[in-house]
Image: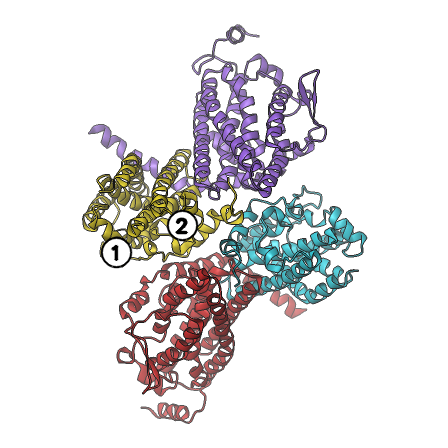
Chain colours: A yellow, B purple, C cyan, D red
């Protein structure tokens, strides 16, 4: 088995699952009915993508782990998502800023993955592209509206940007797994992806009248290698409860 | 009866739909606003008991299905608020009435969801009952309401089937899972029967609603339909309906069932259900916490609408 | 095995465990350092009592379930605690009002259990009496200070009383299990216990300038029979995670 | 040096304790306030990483031990704030400085606790290091501080032993548990070494503190003591210290160890550790949320003190 590719697929799947799970905590609790619908929609899209990544990862591994085994039977240190997606929902500015930072990266990444040398990955990316395009349009639009809305909304969304910024560097901080995927033509290189990300974030922040934090600021890392924040354990304890409490059951 | 009222009733009797711009009696308008908004509120509040298990769904597939269901419910809320708005109230007014505790929503959502099996039981029993209530309303006299109901019913029937499928998996599962399914049936059975409202003998205002064709069958008729439909399904699942008085009457072709605990019904209606306070508090908090966000959207639109129109 | 006694012991243990767990969520987050210490202390006392009740229950059952098996390997419907103790911490007035309602009941109950016909139960009660006496003194004192403090604290503690009141009836709502224990001289009867509880609550509320809700108000029930509120499942998912995720491990 | 300063230094050199009422140089007072309050803040903030696992402790016994430990830490905070208060500052002033980000606490608490094994590693390594730091302070020149340290050290040694006991259970456990223990050691080893502060070469103000006997050994001496004590314990556990350069020097009788990543040390000190923001935000929130409660206690005391005094 190509261990690097397996790890890379887990990262893709874990990012999507953890963010989907976070958003789904808001079911029925959004700030407006239209937001409730959109949140559920994004959560669903990400969950669908999770299942595709995990299924491929499980097949590649060939050890009989299906999507549910991968989702429900790994502890926090075995999860490979970025720190960004496991951060708590906070207020709606926090929720949407987390989403916007992620969506921007996700959009350019998925776009690049449609040209992956791995046909299965390219296919999943192709399938996901419309969804992530919509996600990005939506979260960017809301960041603009909150930033250029009232003084209160401006302050909230600026605070969200400042607090979450330190979790954005990890997406472009490539390690051996990422680099192996770049070398194999499976995944895009970090530098151009980061340039695209910064350019789009800068453009949206300008329109939103927000101050973009420095790209050279100190960045947290560790999630991709399984060293998470304290939040992930709680998220997993809740998410995995039934599978853990009733081992071997079919649902 | 005035000439207008007579003409109105004649159109209804002839099966012609009433539309928003048509003249209608005040009481018709008010009754419809109450009924439609109550239904809309039920969809919105109804997201909460299910949202309670989304984060703990046992498989990714089940999680997807549940999420999609909750999304549908928000959508139903939207259609229904829109249908109510055609009668001259705003969504914000309706929500204000809900949040102030003046408007009702279906009492069934004041029961807690205590296990994964409740996601099955709600789909099977609660959505099942809702469909029985709502299918006739697809033919009701008010056009916007009947059209909203057609869309709603189509999706609800999926939900009921998905709920039954959860129950099926559980009752074919481990002993713990089967117990979970039985426990859910025990807790949801009677509240589901109560969803149809008081017995006909105790029901007020039904005659007028029937005449206006916004209530097409009596509570007891619909309740009987639900029992008749559900008992064989429970048997197929191998689960026991928690009613020792339940028996099939071969002569009538219907199931006879025990006395409903109307004290409990009225207690929950009065606000004493296990979750009344919490459901409302959750919705109020979501709304209040979201005020700054909605204000921001409005402020942005006000700032930018003229500029964009001019461009 | 005496199933009724087993169930009764579980109720005692589950009440203590669930309340201990709730309080322990506040570790390091109390409103003052002295409160942090006191909260931890109460949580510890209740945990110690839990272990005594569970150990006895496990021995009585004779099926090899020890304290940890009982604490970590039952799902929500198998827990027998009152609804009161599983309610969320809320603000500190909610936390302390929940504690005061519980402590008052607990104090009179434990006092009565020191005279239980079951010597083991009487012994555990004897051991716990000093602790629960201190708990009651502390929570009653704080209710008085909050009630007769500032207008804000008065309003908060009154709101807490009004919100939690509906969970107090269950403690005196005896079912067949409770009644069997009364009949066997193991546990005190409901009526005198309730009278003591109402008298003490009324006295403290008077001193606190609080309005006591009506004893005839609608009361929730179900916890003792395993029909809980939606909160308990989350509490258990968190509490039981390690035992569930690593079955068979020794810690 | 003034006559007062000379007399002060002579008392210290003679091993006489300085007490609160005694004259002391301003700089001595300020240094002590900074050092003691930093220590007090560390106890308080240090409750949080451990509080993070109290609700998830794997057995009731372990939960009890951990709760008792956290209670001790709150107690240590109390002694230490009291010791600082003898120097003429109030606890509220000290807390205000903490909450404003002006006062420091031990950087080690800016790392997250990610598994149950971290409860073991913190007890074993962090409390272990704390004791090595603190034991000399039991003999420091300032009486109230030295007495507080004696109480603290006695309890800390329990904590260190309990932490080691957790590690022992894990390293004798399943392969997953052993991996958990190793992972915790990997994450906590270097931060624990950093607890002793910058290397002597980079350390400022040490000479004056040494002369005042409020710093009795150099950072590097204490760090070496910690390594020498801990390496054999790790060996006994069957765990590997994450330092390829670690080796025993038979001549000196000490373990030599690799270069500490001082960039990381300074980054965390500057506020860029994984949890700096969260730890502080949690404490600030607790304090702010508790304002009304503390106000209530004060208001009650004001109302009732005269009445009771008169009675």
Up-down relation of residue D183 to residue A169 (above or below): below
Please provide percent x and percent y for residue B121: 56, 34
Residue B136 left/right relative to D228: right
Q: Compared to D129, does B65 lie above or below?
A: above
Chain identifier of the residue bearing label 2 in the image: A
Of residues C182 and B215, the one drawn nearer to the viewer in this rendering: C182
Above or below, comparing residue A235 to residue C36 in the picture: above
Residue A88 image label: 2
Please tell me the numbered disc located at residue A176: 1
In front: D123, or A34? D123
Q: Is residue C148 visible?
A: no
Judge left or right: residue A58 versus residue C213: left
Q: Residues within 10 Å of mark 1 (few under 14, many from 20)?
A: few
Q: Nearer the viewer, mark 1 or mark 2?
A: 1
Q: Position of residue D115 (x, y in %)?
A: 44, 60
The numbered mark at residue D217 is none
**Of callouts 1 and 2, the N-terminal one:** 2
Q: Position of residue A26 (x, y in %)?
A: 44, 42
């Amino acid at each position: 088995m190509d261990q690097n590719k397996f790890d890379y697929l887990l990262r893709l799947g874990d990012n999507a699952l953890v963010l989907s799970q976070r958003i789904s905590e808001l079911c029925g609790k959004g700030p407006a009915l239209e937001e409730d619908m959109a949140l559920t929609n994004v959560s669903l899209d990400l969950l669908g993508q999770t299942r595709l990544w995990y299924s491929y990862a499980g097949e590649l591994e060939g050890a009989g782990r299906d999507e549910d085994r991968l989702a429900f039977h790994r502890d926090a240190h075995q999860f490979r998502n970025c720190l960004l997606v496991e951060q708590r929902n906070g207020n709606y500015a926090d929720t949407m800023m987390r989403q916007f930072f992620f969506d921007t990266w996700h959009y350019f990444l998925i776009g690049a993955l449609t040209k992956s040398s791995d046909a299965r990955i390219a296919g999943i990316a192709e399938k996901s592209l419309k969804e992530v395009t919509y996600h990005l349009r939506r979260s960017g639009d809301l960041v603009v509206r909150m930033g250029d809305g009232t003084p209160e909304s401006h302050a909230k969304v600026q605070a969200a940007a400042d607090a979450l910024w330190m979790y954005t560097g990890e997406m472009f901080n490539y390690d051996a797994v990422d680099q192996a995927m770049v070398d194999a033509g499976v995944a895009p290189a970090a530098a151009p992806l980061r340039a695209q990300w910064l350019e789009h974030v800068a453009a949206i922040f300008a329109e939103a009248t927000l101050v973009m934090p420095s790209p050279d600021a100190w960045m947290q890392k560790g999630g991709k290698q399984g060293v998470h924040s304290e939040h992930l354990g709680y998220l997993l304890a809740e998410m995995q409860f039934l599978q853990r409490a009733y081992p071997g059951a079919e649902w | 009866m005035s000439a207008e009222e007579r003409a109105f009733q004649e159109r209804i009797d002839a099966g012609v739909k009433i539309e928003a711009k048509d003249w209608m009696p005040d009481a018709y308008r008010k009754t419809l606003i109450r009924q439609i908004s109550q239904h809309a509120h039920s969809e919105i509040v109804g997201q909460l008991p299910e949202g309670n298990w989304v984060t703990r769904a046992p498989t990714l597939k089940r999680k997807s299905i549940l999420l999609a269901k909750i999304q549908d419910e928000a959508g139903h809320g939207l259609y229904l608020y829109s249908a109510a708005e055609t009668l001259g109230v705003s969504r914000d007014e309706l929500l204000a009435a809900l949040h102030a505790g003046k408007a009702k929503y279906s009492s069934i959502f004041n029961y807690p969801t205590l296990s994964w099996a409740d996601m099955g039981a709600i789909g099977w029993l609660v959505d099942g009952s809702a469909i029985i209530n709502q299918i006739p309303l697809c033919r009701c006299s008010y056009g916007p309401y009947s059209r909203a109901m057609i869309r709603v019913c189509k999706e609800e029937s999926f939900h009921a089937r998905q709920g039954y499928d959860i129950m099926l998996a559980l009752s074919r599962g481990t002993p713990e899972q089967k117990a979970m399914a039985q426990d859910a049936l025990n807790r949801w059975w009677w509240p589901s029967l109560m969803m149809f409202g008081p017995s006909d003998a105790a029901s007020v205002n039904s005659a007028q609603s029937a005449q206006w064709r916004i209530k097409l069958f009596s509570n007891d008729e619909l309740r009987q339909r639900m029992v008749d439909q559900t008992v064989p399904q429970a048997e197929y699942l191998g689960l026991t309906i928690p009613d020792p008085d339940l028996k099939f009457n071969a002569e009538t072709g219907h199931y006879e069932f025990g006395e409903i605990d109307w004290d409990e019904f009225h207690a929950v209606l009065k606000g004493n259900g296990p979750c009344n306070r919490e459901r409302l508090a959750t919705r109020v908090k979501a709304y209040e916490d979201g005020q700054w966000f909605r204000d921001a959207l409005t402020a942005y639109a006000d700032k930018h609408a003229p500029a964009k129109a001019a461009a």
